[in-house]
Amino acid sequence: MTTSPSTPQQDLDKALALSGASSFLDSSFASYMDEHDSLRALRDEFVIPTRGEIAPGADRPEESCIYFCGNSLGLMPKAVARYVTEELQVWGEGAVNSHFKHRFGRPWVRIEETVQEQSAKVVGAKKDEVAIMNTLTSNLHTLFAAFYTPTATRHKVLIESKAFPSDHYAVESQIRWHGLDPKDSLICQEPREGEVLLRTEDILETIEKHGHEIAVVCFSGIQFYTGQYFEMEKITKAAQAKGCIVGWDLAHAAGNVPVQLHDWNVDFACWCSYKYLNSGPGGIAGIFVHERHGEDFARNRLAGWWGHDKATRFDMVNVFKPMAGAAGFQHSNPSVLTTSALLGSLSVFEKTSMQEMRKKSFLLTGYLHHLLTTEFSSEVLEIITPVDPEQRGCQLSLVFKRGKMMEIFTGLAARAIIGDERKPDVIRIAPTPLYSRFEDVRRFVVELKELVAEKYN
Ligand SMILES: Cc1ncc(COP(=O)(O)O)c(C=O)c1O
């Protein structure tokens, strides 16, 4: 007999009984959860700004701030400073020779290899399916250049109507690049009237109806505004059954939820590393190309010498021989400093797994969800992120009613609580399992209650 696994809310209820606390808002409940958190030691791997640094003049200036903005920029892992400093040292003392001779064993000529394997683990890929290169929007263009090959009958691209603007611009420009018009070749999946989330059934219906004329389906894994985690495997399967190529932008999913790009048979994907991967502003990005495309050299690609066969790269012969796998899609020699920063941040991921992180994330975001829905009236705030924990990651997107969002946002900032705002009315709050505590969630809710009492009177 199999028993169905418990839901995060059932686990929280059980923990409440065990903690002896009288309510979820009791500090003893949050302390109990933090003490029993198997990832709690990982918080020490990060530099956490103090209240005084974030909100000068705030009381208790030495205490750490509450940081819920990993969906925008992750906190700095301490290891990053060490890895980057080592590269500066090696640059200083070895200069150009450090491409081949490196006292820390990371010759620059192969620097990208140092981050390939752990990156692949994070996105559920085989090592050779991943290349760490460029930045996110550039990589989206690179992948479209290879995978968007419109014909007279199959020339459309299906995206979300509220795709992140950079993705929307990139896709429109790719369509135009082929001499086509987005008016004819772009399908934007709209939510139903009066809804903000996309229903999987509606996406599948569009694919069923238009799949024969769609060249590429390209969604974000997690929607930046609503925090909706799309049913990636289902959508991929349905679109491929219609002959479409399927690509995913994992900006908000990589390091947040345990995607399985290889097993889900995704054609291509790309992500940035400065959000949940904590590699620093403008960090180096990643691509995934499924292994079945890895030796498809007939597929045109934007070429550069870093995609050329390593054995002959320095022969300076102008006959491009791409490497197999995602590596063959690289263009330039990568930024050593940003790659080393990523190496530092991935050293924290090495100490756990996406599955362990997801377990904590279910509880942490579940706790936030529970407190927000029990402590606030729907006249004040509404959560637009899916209620089902399987259909969201760390982030909850809170709509503040009656035009009060900015007032609440600045009030939180003054109390050294960092989320981020998206106009007109949303504050995104993302507790992350690597460095956020249950106590952070509890205190956030307590302080938000005070602010709401002040602003909604
Ligand atoms: C979903 C999504 N796509 C694209 C981008 C743009 O990223 P970049 O500026 O690194 O190209 C972002 C940035 O936040 C994003 O969230």
Image (cartoon, rainbow, N blue to C red):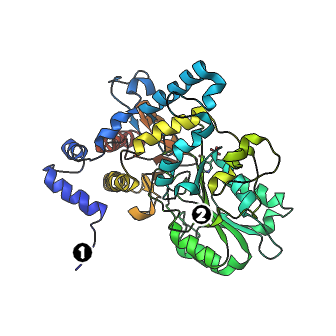
* Element type at mark 2: helix
Q: Is residue 420 above or below residue 139?
A: above
Residue 128 image-quadrant placement: bottom right
Neighbourhood count class around disc 2 (C-alpha, 10 Å): few under 14, some 14–19, many 20 upward = many
- Looking at the image, which is closer to me, 263 or 291? 291
Marking on residue 3: 1
Where residue 253 sits in the image (x, y, percent)?
Answer: 50, 54
- Looking at the image, which is closer to me, 288 or 182? 288
Task: Decide if ligand 1 comes within 8 Å of the CB at mark 2.
Answer: no
Report the mark closest to the observer, 1 or 2: 2
Figure quadrant of the C terminus: top left
Where residue 296 sits in the image (x, y, percent)?
Answer: 70, 64
Query: Total marks drawn?
Result: 2
In the drawing, does residue 419 fall left or right of residue 248? Answer: left
Instruction: Let me know if residue 382 appears in the view.
Output: yes
Q: Is residue 171 above or below residue 406?
A: below
Q: Is residue 188 above or below residue 59?
A: below
- Dot 2 amino acid type: Glu
- For the point 75% across and 46% down, the residue is 304
Q: Is residue 213 above or below residue 368?
A: below
Marking on residue 291: 2
- Looking at the image, which is closer to me, 197 or 298? 298
